[in-house]
Image (spheres, rainbow, N blue to C red):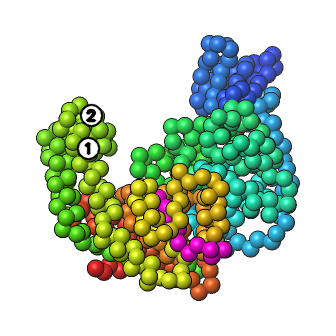
């Protein structure tokens, strides 16, 4: 106690002559007149020789202010440029029990944290309820333009006030604003002190080398991350938790199936290749694997792929091995028999709304051309993209083929059948694809088909992506 009183006396003596000041500057905090005895107490502050002041990342604002208050240190705060705002619901919302649990868990975690719920489980409504409760200007971050406009529509509908848009050519800041991660990275250093509540939708994107600065450059003390799967292949979800808060609530797909999500089943179909394709596949795979063996490359290590690319570029044999790698992948992704199975499943599900997913654009366009189906890829122009999605929603089109653009961020509740022609080993990608068909609708029974080429590398890929609990119960045939 004596040491604490001495510490507080020393702080008071110094502050009397020159009060501590906190300013916001281009995504950082400037701290002036920091007493020497406080330097070790404040997180991430560094001396800046250019300005002869201490600096800290903007996201440390809450921790710094909390420390100052804990030690009864008076300070002048010009960093914060927001106040309490009253946001009123225009529509009544009755949350499901698990949504209430998620909200309570977020509050218990200090009004910070990640909420992990399956696609279609109402993450947006949790955010809406928390915006009204938190009563701070709010910035919602999303990965795509499509998702930005979806959030804008929902927020306008629920709050009945002007909602800002910042991204895709829009530059309007309001008390509630929706932005893309890309725009936030560029502009947060200028407005990062205007919002007290930061929401990060599809927050598994946030730990990326660039996107994380959307969170780093903001002082927002209240933070919410929303995702179906926070885990990342590179293990950087720890960075997500550092910037937003720990994962405070999680609900599984199987827990909500048949309740707030549609009942579903997953069917894996092992497909034989035609003889000529099998021969081409084996030749290409042999060339690829022999190069790996001769070069002593272990593709199971984190650096395996990078090592392969580097060594493949060094010789004619390496370039031939890389070409062989692409060839065997393409054959297994889009074999003739797989395409025949796509047609069988389309016939089986006449009258249903079907999404067909591929790993690459070439396969998507190949299927679209063969079966006269609309195709959505990142190359699809915005006007055509909107026409296809609106046509799918109103029934003009009953089938859409896509590579990756429908993995997340597009609301298609009408879909009840998904056909995975090819994909990566990413657990997230396949949980997201499953989520495209799980939005609840009366009498809806969802089914996801996985087409796997027999005796190919696709079996290992399929095994990895089925580690998620949503894929534990499978019916296999053929």
Assign the C terminus to one quadrant of the image: bottom left
Farthest bottom residue in view? 443
Q: Measuring 41% from the left and 55% from the top, which residue is drawn there?
A: 362
Of the numbered discs in the image, which one, if any, rests on residue 322? 1
**In-image side of 173 versus 117 (left or right):** right
Tell me if I can see residue 319 in this picture: yes
Residue nearest the viewer, comparing 16 with 390: 390
**In-image side of 195 versus 432 (left or right):** right
Residue for badge 2: 313
Q: CA distance from mark 1 to mark 2?
A: 9 Å
From the viewer's perspective, is residue 220 above or below residue 121? above
In the rendered image, residue 395 lying in the magenta stretch gets the answer yes
Assign the N terminus to one quadrant of the image: top right
Q: Quadrant of residue 24?
A: top right
Residue 350 x/y as whole percent? 50, 83
Dots 1 and 2: beta carbons under 8 Å? yes
Of the numbered discs in the image, which one, if any, rests on residue 113? none
Residue 301 x/y as whole percent? 28, 45
User: Considering only order in the chain, which callout, 2 or 1, is on the residue closer to the N terminus?
Assistant: 2
Query: Counting other residues with Cα less than 10 Å from the Cα at mark 2, is it few (<14), some (14-19), or many (20 or more)?
Result: some
Q: Secondary structure at mark 1?
A: helix
Q: Which residues are magenta?
A: 394-403
Q: Quadrant of residue 319?
A: top left
Tell me if I can see residue 109 in this picture: no
From the viewer's perspective, is residue 432 above or below residue 189? below
Q: Measuring 29% from the left and 50% from the top, which residue is drawn there?
A: 326
């Amino acid at each position: 106690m004596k040491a604490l009183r001495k510490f507080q006396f020393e702080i008071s003596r110094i502050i009397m002559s020159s009060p501590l000041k906190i300013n916001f500057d281009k995504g950082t905090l400037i701290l002036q007149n920091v007493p020497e005895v406080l330097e070790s107490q404040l997180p991430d502050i560094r001396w800046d020789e250019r300005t002869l002041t201490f600096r800290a990342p903007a996201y440390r604002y809450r921790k710094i202010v909390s420390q100052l208050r804990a030690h009864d240190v008076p300070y002048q705060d010009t960093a914060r440029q927001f106040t309490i705002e009253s946001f009123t619901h225009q529509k009544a919302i009755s949350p499901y029990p698990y949504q209430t649990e998620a909200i309570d868990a977020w509050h218990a975690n200090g009004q910070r944290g990640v909420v992990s719920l399956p696609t279609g489980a109402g993450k947006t409504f949790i955010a809406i309820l928390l915006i009204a409760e938190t009563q701070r200007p709010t910035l919602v971050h999303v990965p795509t333009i499509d998702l930005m406009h979806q959030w804008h529509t929902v927020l306008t509908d629920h709050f009945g006030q002007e909602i800002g848009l910042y991204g895709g050519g829009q530059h309007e800041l309001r008390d509630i604003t929706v932005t893309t991660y890309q725009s936030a990275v560029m502009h947060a250093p200028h407005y990062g002190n205007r919002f007290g509540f930061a929401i990060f939708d599809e927050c598994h994107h946030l730990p990326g080398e660039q996107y994380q600065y959307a969170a780093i450059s903001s002082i927002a003390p209240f933070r919410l991350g929303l995702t179906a799967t926070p885990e990342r292949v590179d293990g950087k979800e720890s960075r997500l938790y550092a910037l937003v808060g720990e994962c405070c609530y999680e609900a599984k797909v199987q827990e909500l199936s048949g309740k707030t999500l549609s009942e579903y089943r997953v069917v894996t179909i092992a497909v034989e290749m035609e003889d000529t394709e099998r021969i081409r596949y084996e030749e290409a795979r042999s060339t690829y694997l022999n190069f790996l063996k001769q070069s002593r490359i272990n593709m199971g290590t984190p650096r395996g792929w990078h090592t392969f690319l580097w060594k493949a570029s060094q010789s004619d044999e390496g370039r031939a091995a890389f070409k062989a790698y692409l060839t065997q992948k393409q054959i297994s992704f889009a074999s003739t028999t797989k395409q025949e199975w796509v047609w069988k499943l389309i016939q089986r599900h006449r009258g249903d709304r079907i999404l067909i997913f591929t790993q690459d654009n070439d396969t998507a366009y190949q299927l679209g051309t063969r079966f006269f189906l609309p195709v959505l890829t990142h190359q699809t122009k915005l006007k055509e993209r909107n026409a296809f999605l609106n046509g799918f929603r109103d029934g003009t089109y009953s089938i859409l083929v896509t590579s990756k653009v429908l993995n997340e961020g597009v609301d298609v509740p009408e879909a009840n059948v998904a056909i995975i022609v090819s994909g990566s080993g990413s657990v997230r990608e396949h949980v997201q694809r499953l989520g495209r068909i799980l939005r609840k609708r009366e009498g809806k029974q969802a089914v996801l088909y996985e087409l796997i080429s027999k005796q190919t590398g696709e079996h290992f890929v399929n095994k990895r992506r089925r580690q998620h609990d949503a894929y534990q119960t499978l019916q296999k045939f053929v």
